Every structure is written in C-alpha cells, then in structure tokens.
Amino acid sequence: MNHPFSVLLDGYRHLWPNRSLTTETLDEQKSKALLYETIRQELRDEWTHPRVRQTPEVKFYYAVKRVTASDLPDDMKIALIQTYLTAMEQLRPSHT
C-alpha cells in the first residue's frame, strides 16, 4: 500500500487538474516536499481571498470528501488521506 510520493503527486494532480504544479520530473524527496507544501497551502486556503477563507478543518473535510469521491484506486485514496492527515497535524501548533 505504500505509494511513492511521485505517484501520490500524480494522484493529487488527478484530483486537481487545473492546479498548476511543476511539470518537470521530480525525485522522491522533491515530490514529497511539493506534495506536502501544496496540501498545506490548500488546507490554509491560501488560494482564496482572505475574507472568504475557510478553516483548515473545513478544507480538510472537503479534501477528504473529494478524495473519497474520486475514481482513484482505493489504496491510493487511503494514502492520499494519510498524507492530508500528516499535513494537517503539521499545521497544528505544538502543545508542550
């Protein structure tokens, strides 16, 4: 069930065909960095005007809904949702 990040990035592109992500071939580390940064930007709703931005929790809900409704293979859906979960956890302030 472990997909390389380059494959997950392609799955993300499938979900968001109008998003302009790099078209160059990336190695695993760069694919991982680009995927996580893009998901964090999506969760922070950075592509929306500040007055109408949604909270990360709302954006996470819509993202999971979009992933589950897609025609991607189930194991890729699970891997993408896990990636969203990890990105969401990275956005939360640490409580020490």
Image: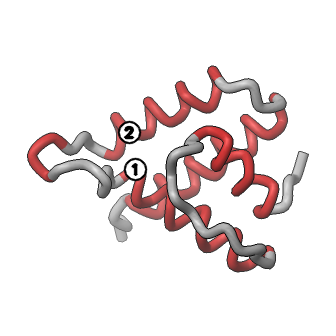
Position of residue 7 measured from the top left corner of the image (x, y, whole percent): 81, 55
What residue is shown at x 31% (from left), y 54% (from top)? Answer: 47
> Which residue is most to the right?
1
Which disc, if any, is residue 43?
Answer: 1
What residue is shown at x 58% (from left), y 56% (from top)? Answer: 86
User: Mark 1 or 2 closer to N-term?
Assistant: 1
**Residue position for label 2:** 59
Position of residue 23 measured from the top left corner of the image (x, y, whole percent): 67, 67
Kind of residue at badge 2? Lys
Residue 2 vs residue 24: left or right?
right
Location of the C terminus (image quadrant):
bottom left
What residue is shown at x 90% (from left), y 45% (from top)? Answer: 1
What residue is shown at x 9% (from left), y 46% (from top)? Answer: 51
**C-beta proximity under 8 Å, tags 1 and 2:** yes
Q: Nearer the viewer, residue 42 or 89?
A: 42
In the rendered view, tell whether residue 23 sits above or below residue 44: below
Residue 47 vs residue 40: left or right?
left
Dividing the picture into quadrants, the one containing residue 53 is: top left
Q: Nearer the viewer, residue 8 or 20?
A: 20
Residue 25 vs residue 43: left or right?
right
Position of residue 25 measured from the top left corner of the image (x, y, whole percent): 77, 74
Q: Nearer the viewer, residue 21 or 89?
A: 21
Kind of residue at badge 1? Leu
Q: Residues within 10 Å of mark 2 (few under 14, many from 20)?
A: some
Does dot 1 land on a helix, a strand or a loop?
helix
